[in-house]
Amino acid sequence: MEKLIQRIQKANSLLCVGLDPVGDDAYVARRLAEVVDQTSEFAAAFKPNLAFFLSRENGVQLLKETVQRIPKDIPVILDGKFGDIASTAEHYARFAYDVVGADAVTVNPYMGDDAVRPFVREGKMVFVLSKTSNKSQYSMQNMALTRGGSLAHGVATVACRLDAEIGGIGLVVGATYPGALADVRAICPEQWFLVPGVGAQGGDLAATLRAGLRPDGAGLLINTSRALWQAEDAAATARELVAQINELRAVEA
Ligand SMILES: O=c1ccn([C@@H]2O[C@H](COP(=O)(O)O)[C@@H](O)[C@H]2O)c(=O)[nH]1
């Protein structure tokens, strides 16, 4: 969390650069290096998505090399959406932190808090999926709880309770449902949200910031992946996004 806050202040950015590499091996190696080098100046964090690396023959090695290329003061969130019983989750945590060198992970909390706790370590952060950006999340995450609210709300309640107990817990909340983002912010007023869905998924940046920014103008990491991977000029696209975000932050403050 400290590393994240320092980086956000230094870069004056809430942009999380997503790394979802596609293409043949030679292209991917070259493009990953380009995107990392060109966007580092603007990045509050990087988010490599594990699936895009594991689908390649040399995926783990490529992921490690990519993480090593990222400047050390920029947090790396490994988007693995891990979720298993504690004894297994412990191995995922070792992979993410000790093998890959990530600073944070995403975790699917469906199996309960023992799926989350093994990822909590000094200096590391865990982003728990609460309200995801995809359309069909509705069928699960909008389920009504007997005590009131939806499953997504229940997860948010548990996540911020866990954060109060052990620290280092943030939430994943998509940019595609700003109303739902506002609801989760009402439940978790202080926590950090990792927010995917701006760019290729069409999330509305202004509505997202309005719904999710904390009064201090922070608390959100706005992720975009394909929009940067496919950009002709990744640096210009990242610079422009940061400028837009900061303009809206100034309005909301
Ligand atoms: O709710 C979620 C959780 C994770 N993701 C991931 O974020 C990126 C989004 O990529 P774009 O190209 O910017 O759409 C990708 O890695 C997803 O797996 C998400 O989209 N929604």
Image: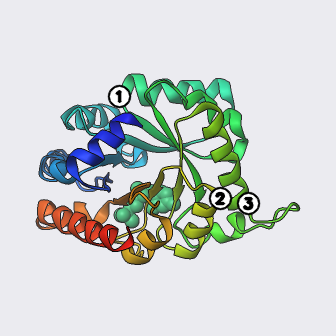
Read off the residue under disc 1.
Answer: 101
Please name whichever residue, 117 or 226, is drawn nearer the observer in this view of the structure.
117
Q: Is residue 107 left or right of residue 199?
A: right
Q: Quadrant of the N terminus?
A: top left
Location of residue 203 in the rendering, given as x and y in whole percent from the top left corner: 42, 74
Q: Quadrant of residue 217?
A: bottom left
* First in sequence: mark 1 vs mark 2: 1
Q: Which mark is residue 187?
A: 2
Three-letter amino acid code at disc 2?
A: Ile
Residue at mark 3 to residue at mark 1: CA–CA distance: 32 Å
Q: Residues within 10 Å of mark 1 (few under 14, many from 20)?
A: some
Please name whichever residue, 23 or 104, is drawn nearer the observer in this view of the structure.
104
Q: Residues within 10 Å of mark 3 (few under 14, many from 20)?
A: some
Viewer-nearest of labels 3 and 1?
Answer: 3
Residue at mark 3 to residue at mark 2: CA–CA distance: 13 Å
Quarter of the image where ligand 1 sits: bottom left
Check disc 3 and report its element: helix, strand or loop. Answer: helix
